[in-house]
Structure formats: structure tokens, C-alpha cells
Image: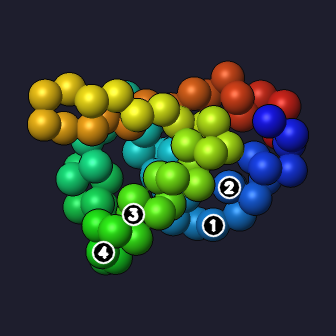
Amino acid sequence: MPPIATLVALADPTRCRILEILRQGPQPVHVLAASFAISRPAISRHLRVLKQARLISEKKLGRENRYALHANRLKPV
């Protein structure tokens, strides 16, 4: 992924805050959404941008989707 895609993903304060939360470890979407005063679909759109930039990944565990940070992908930035 070109560095510009990473920078575009990091340009939004909500996405940066999501990455800060994920530094603590993988989290389900409801935990991430509880940290913001925006709708869950809006959080899902932010997560999609971060996934497309390959900064996070999604893993299904039972009924939950857990998101994990790939901090090594931030090193070039």
C-alpha cells in the first residue's frame, strides 16, 4: 500500500483515536463505538477505511468482530 493511502487514513481524528484504542489490543466494534458520540455505522465506515489502508484487520470470534492494529505498517509514516 502506498504511503499516501496510510496518510489519508490517518487524516481523520476519529480514525487516529480508533488506532490509539487498538494499541491496547484487539477490540470488538461495540467497545470501539462506545468511545465515540457517533453512530455505529459511522464507526464501521471508519474501520473500513483503516482496513483498506491495511492498518487494521478484522477477525470473527463467535458473534463478534474483533479489530486488531498492525502497528508495523505505521513505521514508514
Name the residue carrying label 4.
39
- Closer to the chain start, of discs 4 and 2, is 2
- Closer to the chain start, of discs 4 and 1, is 1
Name the residue carrying label 2.
9
User: Is the C-beta separation of discs 3 and 4 under 8 Å?
Assistant: yes
Residue 48, position as x, y percentages in the image = 51, 53
Residue drawn at point x = 75 percent, y = 59 percent: 8
- Closer to the chain start, of discs 1 and 3, is 1
Name the residue carrying label 1.
12
- Residue 74, above or below 32: above
Judging from the image, what secondary structure is the residue with disc 1 in? loop
User: Is the C-beta separation of discs 4 and 1 under 8 Å?
Assistant: no
Judging from the image, what secondary structure is the residue with disc 2 in? helix
Judging from the image, what secondary structure is the residue with disc 3 in? helix
Q: Amino acid at mark 3?
A: Ile
Extreme residue toward the top, this view: 72
- Closer to the chain start, of discs 3 and 2, is 2
Residue 74, position as x, y percentages in the image = 72, 34
Foreground of the two, 20 or 66? 66
Residue 12, position as x, y percentages in the image = 63, 66
Separation of residues labelled 4 and 1 (CA atoms): 16 Å
Separation of residues labelled 3 and 2 (CA atoms): 13 Å
User: Is the C-beta separation of discs 2 and 1 under 8 Å?
Assistant: yes
